[in-house]
Image: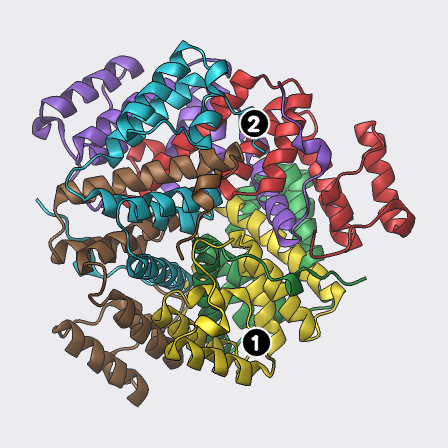
Chain colours: A yellow, B green, C cyan, D brown, E red, F purple
């Protein structure tokens, strides 16, 4: 149970309804997942977040599947169950193989390990890593 | 300055030297970055970590560049300066474009935002995200 | 289920009972929530934590409601379900409106996003932000 | 030094220039801090992030100073130096007293402590905290 | 329910079976906990992680019980329910007293508090803490 | 440079001076490190934090050196430079060997890795880990 009431279609005011309609049109499905129904508690946050996610996850210099894998990596690192489950499902829907999921998890694990080793020993950054492209 | 002495080539015992040799052979460079010189403080950790990183970052079901992008995403989320800088440099060396870096950062930012919104509202996981492939 | 037995009133030794009595007197309610019943597993931690929370959350230079909002912001960032739920309830009891909760969550989300962008790009601190008041 | 070149006024393309102009007009100052100059590396992220921050930090159901205090609390919890310093400066510019800063830090410290105690003992959420307003 | 199928003994291929056999032999029990059954989804991660954990948790310069307490401290800080519960059980099996658990939790709480105070005030490191042993 | 002025002995009011005196007496040294000089910005936080740390770190069911090792583990996980450096120094002063530091770091690294694997796969807690001692 969320800390706020999930907004159903019947309860949605015009601002919320417009976002729900755009989610449905963009994703070509009638299904609206609970994340958006909870954000609808505060319509400006719903609208801003949806428009931001839509922009960020659209195809660009990175493949949409790679974008989902990055989302899983951050969500596992932050310990967000909702986000791990929803983005794992989304990545599978975009073609992620089980071997790819296994490699994502292996990297997430190793990166969390080496991040703490670098911090725990306070390793100084090598000069060569300080170069910035023109 | 790290909390332990960085191990130079002249100070390296045989266990450490063997790992340093393998790093040089695998990466086809004479350069050993500070992370490995700090881990050499504890030879079993140096050896285990290098072998793990070598296995995890090798080409597999994911492209080596995608693996570096995942590493950057975790490191930025954890706030590890050393790791952000070294893996950003590594990703550029593997061909990451500036547009790709921009998209990685955009996703890292959004994922951190939506992770906290899902947690802050305690959004319940939708049934449809609970399915596991056979 | 917690990892330790929750201490009921009948099981409470004198040190625990004294803290429970002070919680009841301070909050003007008979209800002791599970957090305190779990901490009672280690009486010095119960006593120290209760006295600290009582001091920190008392009215001062900040309004008690603002203090609860800060608590929610930290708890959502850390992903602590118990803390998010108990402090959201406490803030509502102190008069938090649903619009205020919506704004807290919007800020928590944005701050988590921009924190990672600043770290992910390793943005150097501007001189002007380094000034300290006399 | 950031991992990307900071964009100066002379290097800014039209999209970046438009955002910089809006930052200057909104904040009534000529100063553009490094965060925005780094985000300008990826113009869509600059534009989206600025518009989001402008919307979220505007006066609403919460006072602008309270919004800055919430930003400090998240930034200290996440360990983002840039964000701690810039939002502490911003809060002082909006009238935060040193006593208020002291109370924010006291709450941030206690919330981080009790978050971990609740998680470390896996305290079950009390029924009474599960109620959602209609 | 995990995001991947837990691997039962009957489904285990030879690589997985070899690791399960070693877990059973090392721990002198027939029981394989869910963590390993989930990792078996990706056999190289199962094998690498088991061998690493076996090496790291073996008796050495630190007592095995102290090692479990360190594991609990990290797991509580990261908010990992599975890890808190499994390592609390493991520590009890190795003789951890309830008073010791209480002290671990007290330290975890205080360290999380003072970590955020040091970061929130951006306290500069004292010269005396920068010395490294020869 | 901290975000607040560090309080020198000459600037200390009576409340701060009393805490500084107790730190000196307890630690049998004239040296007051910067953490306490920053907290002195808000005297009630200085006093409460010092008394709490003094109580928590005193000898008890755990050895004082083990307590320092736990503090290092949390601080490395949270990425607090000040805390990593000051508690590594404190642990060495209490007799920590370099081999012990190496093992602490190895465990911190592995725990961060397995925490993320357990969360990333959403591994369900085994029944056997849910037992609570009477």
- Whether residue B88 is visible: yes
Q: Which residue is mark 2?
A: F100
Q: Is residue A122 above or below residue B30?
A: above
Q: Which of the 4 quarters of the picture holds residue E31?
A: top right
- Which numbered disc covers residue B95? 1
In the rendered structure, the answer to whether residue F28 lies left or right of residue C15 reads left
Q: Secondary structure at mark 2?
A: helix
Label 1 marks which chain's residue?
A: B
Q: Is residue A61 above or below residue E115?
A: below
In the rendered image, the residue lying farthest to the bottom is: D14
- Which numbered disc covers residue B33? none
Q: Secondary structure at mark 1?
A: loop
Label 2 marks which chain's residue?
A: F
Give the x, y percent position of residue F116. Answer: 60, 49
In the rendered image, the residue lying farthest to the top is: C14
Give the x, y percent position of residue C69. Answer: 30, 49
Alpha-carbon neighbours of circle 1 within 10 Å: few (<14), some, or many (≥20)?
few
Q: Nearer the viewer, residue F53 or B92?
A: F53
């Amino acid at each position: 149970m969320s800390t706020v009431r999930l907004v159903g279609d019947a309860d949605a005011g015009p601002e919320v309804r417009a976002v729900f309609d755009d989610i449905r049109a963009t994703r070509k499905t009638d299904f609206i997942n609970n994340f958006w129904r909870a954000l609808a508690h505060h319509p400006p946050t719903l609208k801003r977040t949806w428009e931001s996610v839509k922009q960020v996850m659209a195809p660009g210099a990175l493949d949409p599947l790679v974008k989902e894998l990055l989302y899983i990596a951050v969500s596992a690192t932050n310990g967000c169950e909702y986000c791990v489950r929803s983005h794992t499902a989304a990545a599978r829907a975009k073609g992620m193989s089980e071997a790819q999921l296994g490699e994502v998890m292996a990297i997430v694990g190793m990166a969390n390990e080496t991040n703490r080793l670098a911090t725990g020993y306070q390793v100084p950054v090598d000069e060569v890593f300080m170069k910035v492209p023109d």
